[in-house]
Image: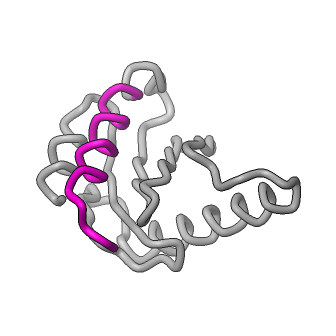
């Protein structure tokens, strides 16, 4: 799984990636030196839980993918059914440029057949 994340991080504009559970448990990570594992996991867990509660209150199922944009960059969250792929990109990165690689990484992780 770490190899998939390392390969994903080679895409221009990607600062780091990880797989976490909804509770914020880190399954695998490949974050850049300027990203703290515990902080990214905690923020990811909170955002995932809030998004799922909001969708549930609207009578919708869990999200497949969503992107959060901040002043410093973006976080892309992909539901893996057994966890979540979190990809952090630079602000100037156009999401269309990384979308195929993110989906490819998610498909590979899903295909591993591991329970997280």
Please tell me which residue lies in front, 95 or 91.
95
Query: From the viewer's perspective, is residue 41 above or below residue 111?
Result: below
Please tell me how many numbered marks the rendered image carries: 0
- Residue at the image position 76 percent from the left and 66 percent from the top: 53
Side of 54 relative to 43 (left or right): right
Query: Where is residue 65, by image quadrant?
Result: top right
Position of the C terminus by quadrant: bottom left
Q: Quadrant of residue 46?
A: bottom right
Residue at (30% x, 42% y) in the render: 107
Q: Residue at x 62, y 41 (%)?
A: 69
Image position, residue 7 (x, y; %): 16, 42
The stretch of residues the image draws in magenta is 99-116
Q: Considering depth in this image, is 9 or 115 the residue closer to the camera?
A: 115
Tell me the quadrant of the picture where the N terminus can be found: bottom left
What's the magenta bit mostly, secondary-structure-wise?
helix
Q: Is residue 85 magenta?
A: no
Residue 60's spot in the image, x, y percent? 78, 51
Relative height, residue 105 to residue 32 (above, below): above
Where residue 105 appears, as percent x and y from the top left, is: 28, 42
**Quadrant location of residue 26?**
bottom left
Q: Is residue 110 magenta?
A: yes
Q: Residue at x 24, y 50 (%)?
A: 111
């Amino acid at each position: 799984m770490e190899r998939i994340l390392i390969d994903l991080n080679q895409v221009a504009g990607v600062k780091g990636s990880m797989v976490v559970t909804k509770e914020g448990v880190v399954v695998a990570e490949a974050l850049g030196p300027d990203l703290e594992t515990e902080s990214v996991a905690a923020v990811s867990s909170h955002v995932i839980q809030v998004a799922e509660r909001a969708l549930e209150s609207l009578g919708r199922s869990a999200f497949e993918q969503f992107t959060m944009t901040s002043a410093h960059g973006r976080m892309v969250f992909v539901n893996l059914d057994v966890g979540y792929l979190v990809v952090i990109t630079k602000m100037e990165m156009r999401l269309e440029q990384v979308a195929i690689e993110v989906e490819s990484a998610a498909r590979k992780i899903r295909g591993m057949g591991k329970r997280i």
